[in-house]
Image (cartoon, rainbow, N blue to C red):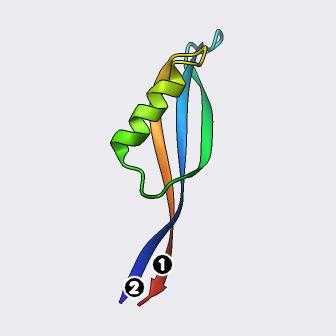
Amino acid sequence: MAVSQMTDSRLTLVLDDGDDMMTGKTIYKSKSFNNVKTSATADQLFAIATAVAGLQQRPLYTIERSDNSEITQA
């Protein structure tokens, strides 16, 4: 039987940087924060992300969490 153990996590704020003048498509910029505690809940990360987003010049588009896990045999 295999077991998955979360090894690290990253929080990314995706910010709206306006529209491209040529194509009209929205441009997104991202700010990433490494070494997020793997035990952090979605509510905790949302609170931190919205607080940090308030310090940015660009409006917040979305919040993403990326987790990496190690899979081993039990």
Residue behind mark 2: 2
Q: Quadrant of residue 15?
A: top right
Question: Measured along the vertical axis of the image, is residue 49 above or below residue 56?
Answer: below
Kind of residue sitting beneath label 1: Ile
Question: Measured along the vertical axis of the image, is residue 32 above or below residue 74?
Answer: above
**Residue 42 locus on image (x, y percent):** 36, 44
Real-space Cα separation, disc 2 to disc 1, in angstroms:
7 Å
- Classify mark 1: residues with Cα within 10 Å, few (<14), some (14-19) or many (20+): few
**Residue 45 locus on image (x, y percent):** 43, 40
Mark sitting earlier along the chain (2/1): 2
The quarter of the picture where the C terminus appears is bottom left
Foreground: 69 or 46? Answer: 46
* Local secondary structure at mark 1: strand
Point out the residue furthest to the right here.
22
Residue behind mark 1: 71
Kind of residue sitting beneath label 2: Ala
Tell me whether the residue at label 2 lies in contact with that at label 1, contact meaning CB atoms closer than 8 angstroms. Answer: yes
The quarter of the picture where the N terminus appears is bottom left
Q: Residue at x 53, y 30 (%)?
A: 14
